[in-house]
Amino acid sequence: MGEASATEPDGADDGVIVTRALSKRYRGGQLAVDGLRLTVPAGSVFGFLGPNGSGKTTTIRMLMGLIEPTSGTAHVLGRPMPRSARAVLPHVGALIEGPALYGFLSGRDNLLRYDAADPTADPRTRRTRVAAALDRVGLTAAAGKKAKAYSLGMKQRLGLAAALLQPRRLLVLDEPTNGLDPQGMREIRTLIRELASDGTTVFLSSHLLDEIEQVCTHAAVMTRGRLITQGPVADLSAGARGRLVVTTPDPADAARVLKELGVADVVVADDRVTGEAPERDLAEVNAALVTAGVRVRGFGVERASLEDAFVALTGEGFDVAG
Amino acid sequence: MSRAEAVRKVSPLWTFGLFRSELLTTFRRWRTLALLGVLAAVPVLVGVAVRIETGDGSSAGGGGGPAFISQVTNNGLFLVFTALAATLPFFLPMAVGVVAGDALAGEASAGTLRYLLVAPAGRSRLLLTKYATVMAFCLVATLVVALSALTVGAVLFPLGDLTTISGTRISFTEGLARALLIALVVAVSLIGVAALGLFVSTLTSSGIAAMATTVGLLITVPILDQIPQLHALHPYLFSHYWLSFADLMREPVHWDDLTKNLGLQAVYAAVFGSAAWARFTAKDITA
Ligand SMILES: Nc1ncnc2c1ncn2[C@@H]1O[C@H](COP(=O)(O)OP(=O)(O)OP(=O)(O)O)[C@@H](O)[C@H]1O
Ligand SMILES: [Mg+2]
């Protein structure tokens, strides 16, 4: 393994994470990840979305060199994985499928152990860095307690602390707010924003759409091992069109006018008439309603949330794909 | 990404640091301490039993029991040899089998293995560290038996010059040196089991399954060693030359079986060490 720069151009230096046709079939299983083509821009906070069993954790395991891809390539920080694991991983902090701790060791000793496993970690600064990481996740007071006595949220925080033992260029967080109280969630979100503003790229898998919407600049959506879409969060939610909402005492007339104007999917509910937001100028639509003698109380477009986009894209009910 | 940043320097003492962390982690598990406790208790039981039985002045053992037991009443130092002979067939290898079997499988089932690997400890280095730690445990376990026996022997029985199996007399100091040498040979005798246990540990992600398999092998192999029809197989069973350590108490020392034992342990270490390496470096870590 060369001691050269971890960012040397390798045909894939346009993103912090770049995968091409990445696939994984577990032994005796179906394709868990199928032809993934993912590009995570440097400096982004990248949300990785998908229903249960869609292949998020499998992708992360391949990126971290824990499992070998069945086919395709994955580059992290410009280097191929899993081949360059020893050069790449010291720059990456990871939380994969929840924290894993030595229950019989204290929180502090757990971090000391994980830090000792990093070949680039300076043993002379180990204690200071561990203390700083504990402080960063708010565990200083519980640092001496045995990890088996930690609550779920405390374990999650300790796992995050392990990812923050060194300055990182990339953080890979698999459902980091799992098990945290609302206060903890907010702290983690703040922490992620802080890290991102320092230039760390954050790759974040989550089920919590509003969380992704709040912290992420970019997102990708997976179902059944396939990537459906990726891009800036604003573009994704814009992709699912908002709905035009007209509030009026004359709903029947309003619905007729809207249909004549070519508005699709018109639905009447009491005094609310809604339809897909049309391409044409909304001022014209409003003028047409008034001209037709419809008395308009309210008029506007409700912006689609990421959740609408997600449901529209994955089109899935509650059941996990088998 | 134009920000060209050099790869972080690898700290030269890193492998040592990982080994130290591994030792600390292993010897802080209550399971390890419990195993060492059991091993320390065996010489106490043997010593007390001999003391009670010979309270009326008769000699112990009457020919039966572990090697050297009839000599213990004359010289407490013999309790060291007796205790090692009593623990080598089962207690010592069982303790080593549990620690070795759990070494990787236990970390896999706890999930801590994936964090060690993304740290990144490196698979070969981690395996080597585990290997070294299990070897260290072999030595510590043997020394625990020997020291416990020496202490109990000194408290319950007289100490002094001793008679070798060949009938010659050696000084107490030389006897002590032989005891230390025997302890080392016993520790080395456990290397085969350690290598086997570590290999089993790479096969599964369940610490319990790995420990059970290893201990099962420990029970099976000595039985195979007793079946005359399997005669051709016997020289390759890791336990076959175990009791050759008694030859160190001859004058002159019989090296024949001792060297065969050391060679056999080296073969086990090489074969199962390579198998463990091949398996572990190619394994999907999903737990
Ligand atoms: N170790 C394994 N062996 C075999 N199949 C597996 C293994 N791990 C996961 N799978 C399968 O791979 C698919 C993807 O699983 P994965 O854990 O990547 O999903 P996920 O998106 O992380 O789900 P979740 O949101 O529930 O964490 C699933 O169909 C799952 O059954
Ligand atoms: Mg998952």
Image: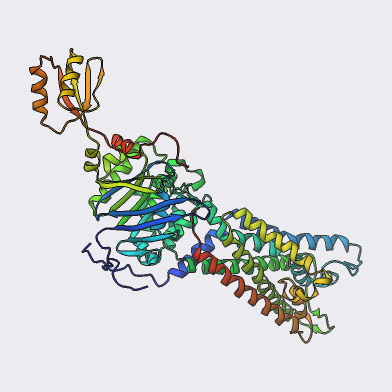
How many numbered badges does the structure rendering display? 0
Query: Observer-nearest residue: B118 or B276?
Result: B276
Residue that appears at 65% across and 64% down: B96
Task: Residue lying at the far top in this picture: please name it.
Answer: A249
Task: Residue lying at the far front in this picture: please name it.
Answer: A260
* x and y, in percent, of residue B89 in the image: 75, 66
**Quadrant where the N terminus of chain B lies?**
bottom left
Name the image quarter holding residue A313: top left
Left or right: residue B171 versus residue A194 is right
* x and y, in percent, of residue B8 in the image: 32, 67
Q: Can residue A95 be seen here?
A: no
Name the image quarter holding residue B155: bottom right
Q: Against B271, is A143 above or below?
A: above
* x and y, in percent, of residue A209 in the image: 32, 38
Q: Can residue B34 be seen here?
A: yes
Left or right: residue B95 versus residue A262 is right
Which colour assignment does the render follow?
A: rainbow
Left or right: residue B59 versus residue B22 is right
* x and y, in percent, of residue B173 in the image: 72, 80
Residue that appears at 27% across and 51% down: A195
Left or right: residue A189 versus residue B280 is left
